[in-house]
Image (cartoon, rainbow, N blue to C red):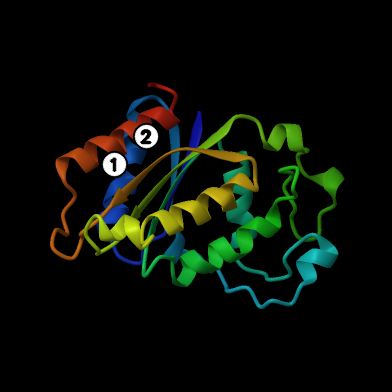
Amino acid sequence: MRIIAIDASPRHGVVSHSVETAAAAAQAAGAEVERVRLYDLEIRTCTGCGMCRITDACKIGDDLPSLVERIASADGVILGIPAYFRKPEGASAAFLDRVNGYFASSGQLRLPGMGPREVAHAPVVRDARRAVIITACAAPEPLATFFGYTTGPVRQLRAALGSGGIRTVGSLAVTDTWRHPEVHEWEEDKARSLGRILAGKI
């Protein structure tokens, strides 16, 4: 079992802590875990050129193709993204805007300069891959859910991962981080449970 844990938070805060908690639990359950900080990579914003519709691949030469390959080859994904007014920002937003373009509707991976015969076919790429999503926002409940501060990013992430044949099996939304910047015990427990679920131990 190979899992990639992607921390898309610009700061080492609640999201980073929760992603690491889930990753450590998955590792303790026997999974091989690769940790990635999105802000250590060069992920550029979509230019809207439309070349991906013509060539089936994004023309931007940054670190995203390599990351998508690692996601496609993993059995599971832990993805943590902070929510700012209902949606991610910065590198997180750029990642979500462009990641769909790397997967065909069948789930087959598409990479720059490579034809369909040169990458794994859909039955391999879509093979039983799962994800858990972690997000956080400053708003308290029930405002966070009512205004979609946490549910919005989770929906967007679920759709982006689903386009690559990755099924979301659980999520954690940490709220009210303005007043309570620390992770509560029940939130830590849920992050650990998500890690174990992804590793197939629950």
Q: Which of the two residues, 191 or 4, is positioned nearer the viewer here?
A: 191
| Residue at 31% from the left image edge and 54% from the top image edge | 16
Query: Which mark is first along the chain, 1 or 2?
Result: 1
Q: Secondary structure at mark 1?
A: helix
| Residue at 64% from the left image edge and 40% from the top image edge | 165
- In the rendered image, residue 179, in percent from the top left (x then y), is placed at 13, 63
- In the rendered image, residue 130, in percent from the top left (x then y), is placed at 52, 35
- In the rendered image, residue 104, in percent from the top left (x then y), is placed at 75, 50
Q: Which residue is mark 1?
A: 21
Q: Which residue is mark 2?
A: 195
Crowd rating for badge 2 (residues with CA inside 10 Å; few <14, some 14–19, many 20+): many
Q: CA distance from mark 2 to mark 1?
A: 8 Å
Q: Find residue 87 and report its image quarter.
A: bottom left
- Position of 50 relative to 171 (above/below): below
Side (left or right) of 21 relative to 163: left
Whether the residues at callouts 2 and 1 have beta carbons within 8 Å, the answer is yes
Is residue 37 in view from this perspective? no
Indicate which disc residue 45 carries: none
Quarter of the C terminus within the rendering = top left
Residue lying at the far left in this picture: please name it.
Answer: 179
The three-letter amino acid code for the residue at tag 1 is Thr
Q: How many marks?
A: 2
Q: Which of the two residues, 53 or 1, is positioned nearer the viewer here?
A: 53
- Position of 175 relative to 19 (above/below): below
The three-letter amino acid code for the residue at tag 2 is Gly
| Residue at 60% from the left image edge and 29% from the top image edge | 128
Crowd rating for badge 1 (residues with CA inside 10 Å; few <14, some 14–19, many 20+): many
Is residue 94 in view from this perspective? yes
